[in-house]
């Protein structure tokens, strides 16, 4: 499920939901069907900033995957970010044309699951809504836990009743739903039950750590980070881009990607936070110091791939297939 080339879409409608979430419905600019997607997928939008630069930003699709006419997005306003969400909140209106650079799914449902526990914290509800729709359409079993600070900050209240009593609301202020308590709200782990979690990084780390402590097996805990802090600390090291024949020193606070770019190596980056996977490349020599939230623990242990927007080196030198 990828795009052969970028496609143009047009905003069909815009609404401003609770919790600073902008909802956009997108239709194909040519009026036809959009490419099919599966629950958990996201699109990468080229967001034109006021200064003429373009940011690539990823947003999960929350609509029913069976609907080929429109893609539905929920975009949280993040004033402290580099401007992608701020720009979309400011410019989006019916008729606005946008370019979709990519359609990807790094967060698919496990086809073998007999039951799925979907946990969305804040804006992390978006992929969960698509998952709930896909599981419901297949007659599957699921529970959808929606965790927010308060009901006044809870988006999609018009959509959630469609999932009936599968929905459990949790609000930190306890009004209209008890705060989420993993020890109480997660079922006992079993082989047929899979857990999916999405939301702010701290929320996700808390749910994942709690699930592990409750005995959930790693392969049945699925996650998607939207944003993450990048830890760029640590000493300098050397990186050789083998195919390009270029070697650079990566200083503390700098990323491998930016050091290589400065030296003239063409690099593809998008989120620059170790969550989207765009900058993944193969490691030919040396040991990566993984700082991302994209690779699984097994992939990190294998040590043959690295995300160069955020990860560093445990050895004085890395050789990459670039
Ligand atoms: S650019 Fe997104 S993981 Fe590196």
Image (tube, rainbow, N blue to C red):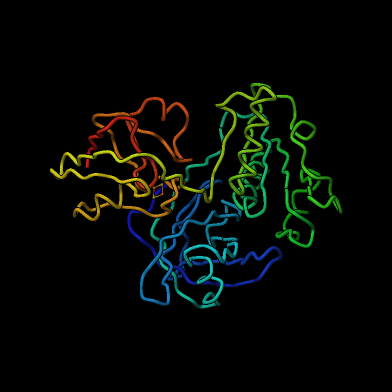
* 111 lies above or below 191: below
Q: x, y (%) of residue 119?
A: 68, 42
Residue 85 location in percent, x, y? 53, 66
Q: Nearer the viewer, residue 179 or 229?
A: 229
For the point 47% across and 59% down, the residue is 34
Q: Quadrant of residue 190?
A: top right
From this view, report whether residue 304 is shown above or below residue 13: above
Left or right relative to 106: residue 252: left
For this view, does 241 lie left or right of residue 144? left
| Residue 75 rendering spot, x and y as whole percentages | 58, 62
Residue 249 placement: quadrant: top left
- The answer to which of 50 and 21 lies nearer the viewer is 50
Residue at 61%, 49% (x, y): give it. 200
Split into 4 quadrants, where in the image is the C terminus?
top left
> As rendered, which of 48 and 293 lies closer to the eye?
293
Find the residue positioned furthest to the left. Answer: 245
Residue lying at 28% horizontally and 45% vertically, measured from the top left: 250
Residue at image position (41%, 35%) is 290
Numbered circles on residues, count: 0
Residue 269 in the image, given as x and y percentages of width and height: 35, 53
């Amino acid at each position: 499920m990828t795009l052969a080339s970028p496609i143009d879409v047009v905003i069909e409608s815009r609404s401003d939901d609770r919790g600073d979430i902008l909802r956009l419905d997108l239709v194909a600019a040519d009026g036809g069907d959009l490419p099919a997607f599966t629950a958990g997928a996201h699109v990468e939008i080229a967001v034109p900033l006021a200064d003429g630069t373009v940011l690539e930003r990823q947003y999960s699709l929350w609509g029913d995957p069976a609907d080929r006419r429109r893609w539905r997005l929920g975009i949280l306003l993040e004033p402290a970010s580099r401007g992608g969400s701020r720009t979309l909140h400011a410019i989006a209106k019916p008729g606005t044309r946008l370019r979709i650079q990519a359609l990807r799914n790094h967060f698919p449902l496990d086809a073998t699951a007999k039951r799925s526990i979907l946990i969305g914290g804040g804006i992390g509800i978006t992929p969960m809504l698509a998952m709930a729709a896909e599981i419901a359409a297949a007659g599957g079993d699921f529970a959808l836990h929606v965790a927010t600070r308060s009901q006044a900050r809870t988006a999609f209240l018009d959509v959630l009743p469609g999932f009936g009593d599968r929905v459990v609301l949790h609000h930190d202020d306890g009004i209209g739903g008890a705060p989420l308590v993993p020890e109480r709200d997660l079922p006992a782990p079993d082989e047929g039950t899979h857990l999916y979690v999405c939301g702010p990084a701290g929320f996700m780390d808390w749910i994942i750590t709690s699930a592990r402590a409750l005995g959930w097996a790693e392969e049945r805990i699925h996650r998607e980070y939207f944003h993450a802090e990048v830890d760029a600390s640590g000493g300098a090291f050397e990186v050789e881009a083998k195919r390009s024949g270029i070697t650079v020193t990566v200083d503390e606070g700098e990323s491998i990607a930016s050091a290589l770019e400065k030296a003239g190596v063409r690099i593809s980056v998008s989120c620059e936070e170790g969550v989207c996977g765009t900058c993944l490349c193969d490691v030919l020599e040396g040991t990566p110091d993984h700082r991302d939230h994209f690779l699984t623990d097994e992939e990190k242990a294998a040590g043959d791939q690295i995300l160069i927007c955020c990860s560093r080196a445990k050895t004085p030198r890395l050789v990459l297939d670039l």
